[in-house]
Amino acid sequence: MKKCYMLMAVLVILTVSSAVAENVSAENNHPDNEKTVRIATYNMHTGIGTDGHYNLDRLANTIRESGADIIGLQEVDVHWGSRSEFENQIEMLADTLNMGLFYWTRPHQANEKAIRCSRLSKYPIIHS
């Protein structure tokens, strides 16, 4: 009977010490320099807000306040028309926010005015 209690005590000690060791090990393996990357997507409606007014600075502030590191944008005007003052919106936003940019369009629109999808990134865009 004594051997049974002794065996049970040893098993409990081993189980507890194993659990504690795993917990300590997990804490030690957690990198202190871990970084969270925030990704957002935004349909910018060609820079026209819900009030019906075109304001690219307001849009830039909204993006900045989001804290996103990488932003996917839809309905980006590039020299499209008077509604966006014929501006290249993605270049203006990239400059204002000090971010890298990438955009794509259909091949026949490559050198023309267009509505595009684009990406802004705080990280360098190495290849696209």
Image (cartoon, helix red, strand yellow):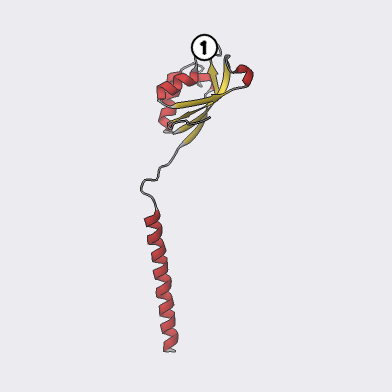
Numbered marks: total: 1
Q: What amino acid does circle 1 point to?
A: Phe
User: Foreground: 127 or 86?
Assistant: 127
User: Foreground: 50 or 54?
Assistant: 54
Where residue 108 sits in the image (x, y, percent)? 63, 17
User: Foreground: 103 or 15?
Assistant: 103
Q: Residue at x 41, y 73 (%)?
A: 14
Question: Is 24 rendered above or below residue 119?
Answer: below
Quadrant location of residue 115? top right
Where residue 78 sits in the image (x, y, percent)? 53, 17
Quadrant location of residue 123? top left
Extreme-front residue of the structure: 127
Mark 1 sits on what residue? 86
Q: Is residue 32 left or right of residue 114?
A: left
Q: Is residue 106 left or right of residue 46?
A: right
Q: Residue at x 52, y 24 (%)?
A: 44
Extreme-bottom residue of the structure: 1
Where residue 41 sits in the image (x, y, percent)? 52, 31
Q: Residues within 10 Å of mark 1 (few under 14, many from 20)?
A: few
Question: Is 84 rendered above or below residue 1?
Answer: above
Is residue 74 visible to the viewer in this orientation of the structure? no
Is residue 107 visible to the viewer in this orientation of the structure? yes
User: Foreground: 96 or 64?
Assistant: 96
Q: Quadrant of the N terminus?
A: bottom left
Q: What kind of element bears circle 1? A: loop
Q: Residue at x 62, y 20 (%)?
A: 107
